[in-house]
């Protein structure tokens, strides 16, 4: 008999593996550190007719109170972060299990721009292309060259060019059209070393004024701003028991935008907004929540809203997933009633 590359565990609590600290157990749990181990774990799941869920850093995840009646694969692929010069570009091939912020810091310390505005986002590298993670005017798709995945249909490892990943606002083929087909094992990033940080968000513009910051300057500033908003995971700080921004900024048609302005008796230029694709308009979800009465520090039982960031729903202490979902539903219903906008949940829901 050949030696096994995996250790299969049973009834492992998932709450401690998430930033929300909420949720029930996994029927089976396996940490995989190589492509061979991943293949073996997937084979086990198929033999047992088990659904599979891939867990990275647990930062964009809400686990149900019943947990998951399947196999949770914890992707722990790791290897050194080494830049390689390819023509006039710098490339990094990064394993999926590498902590995202560790990678961002390594890039910024090299004076390379492209991901500095994404500093402080919790989780692992493998999760970033799935959601097309973005913040402060940057999206991870802007720096991705390719994504290495296990294609569960063909049971082969393939490298998908960025153009085939279907990136758009908080979306990719991995969480939409091809959800459940691929498991990310590595991401290759490509940077232009001549580029300087381009600041588009008011928080950063105010922070730096007329000076031209380095990528490392922006890295530290973003982490400071995120910390001030309770969006930096710091053990012991209650506002940090969250899954980050819980709702996506809605992209709406002009008629919906006009309805929001009319409902609040505001002129259009008094409603914060940004242009979006195909003539649509993006509205800040946090602003809509506040106008609906869901302000910082709002509490509903053991769940609540962060005292520092309106979009962060938090576990106020021993909250259940049911507590959190009750707050989510109340927010969605009120915003829908007032403005005709259905807010979309950003964190992945398991179970």
Image (cartoon, rainbow, N blue to C red):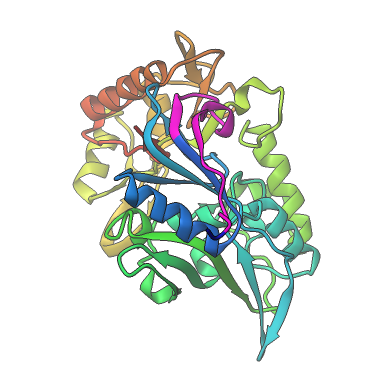
Relative vertical location of residue 251 with respect to residue 59 in this rendering, above or below = below
Span colored in magenta: 3-27
| Residue 146 seen in the figure | yes
Residue at image location 67% in from the left, 66% down from the top:
197
Up/down of 264 relative to 176, above or below: above
Residue shown at the point (32%, 55%) measured from the top left:
179
Q: Nearer the viewer, residue 234 or 201?
A: 234
Residue 17 image position (x, y, % from top left): 57, 33
Please state if 8 lies on the left or on the right of 237 as rendered.
left
Figure check: 233 above or below 324: below
| Front residue (pair 110, 255) | 110
Give x and y (percent) for residue 237: 69, 23
Residue drawn 49% across the image and 69% down it: 147
Picture coordinates of residue 66, whole percent (x, y): 37, 23
Farthest-out residue, bottom:
87
Can you say which quadrant of the picture contains the C terminus?
A: top left
Out of 163 and 331, give the one closest to the viewer: 163
């Amino acid at each position: 008999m050949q030696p096994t590359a995996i250790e299969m565990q049973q009834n492992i609590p998932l709450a401690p593996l998430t930033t929300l600290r909420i949720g029930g157990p996994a029927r089976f749990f396996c940490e995989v550190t190589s492509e061979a181990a991943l293949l073996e774990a997937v084979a086990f799941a198929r033999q047992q007719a088990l659904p599979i869920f891939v867990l990275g850093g647990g930062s964009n995840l809400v686990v149900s109170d019943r947990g998951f009646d399947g196999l949770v694969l914890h992707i722990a692929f790791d290897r050194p972060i080494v830049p390689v010069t390819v023509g006039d570009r710098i490339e990094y091939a990064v394993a999926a299990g590498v902590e995202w912020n560790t990678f961002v810091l390594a890039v910024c310390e090299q004076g390379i721009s492209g991901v500095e505005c994404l500093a402080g986002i919790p989780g692992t590298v493998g999760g970033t292309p799935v959601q097309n993670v973005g913040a402060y005017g940057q999206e991870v798709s802007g720096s991705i060259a390719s994504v290495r995945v296990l294609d569960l249909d063909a049971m082969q490892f393939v490298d998908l060019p960025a153009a085939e990943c279907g990136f758009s606002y908080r979306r990719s083929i991995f969480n939409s059209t091809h959800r459940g087909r691929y498991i990310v094992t590595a991401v290759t990033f490509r940077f232009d070393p001549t580029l300087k940080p381009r600041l588009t968000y008011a928080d950063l513009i105010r922070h730096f004024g007329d000076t031209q910051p380095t990528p490392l300057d922006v890295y530290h500033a973003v982490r400071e701003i995120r910390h001030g908003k309770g969006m930096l995971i710091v053990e012991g700080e209650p506002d940090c028991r969250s899954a980050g921004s819980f709702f996506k900024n809605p992209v709406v048609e002009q008629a919906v935008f006009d309805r929001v302005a009319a409902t609040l008796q505001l002129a259009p230029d008094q409603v914060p907004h940004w242009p979006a694709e195909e003539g649509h308009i993006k509205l800040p979800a946090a602003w809509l929540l506040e106008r609906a009465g869901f302000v910082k520090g709002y509490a509903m039982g053991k769940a609540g809203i962060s005292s520092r960031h309106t979009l962060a729903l938090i576990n106020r202490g021993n909250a259940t997933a049911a507590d959190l979902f009750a707050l989510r539903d109340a927010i969605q219903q009120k915003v829908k009633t007032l403005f005709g906008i259905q807010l979309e949940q950003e964190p992945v829901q398991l179970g």
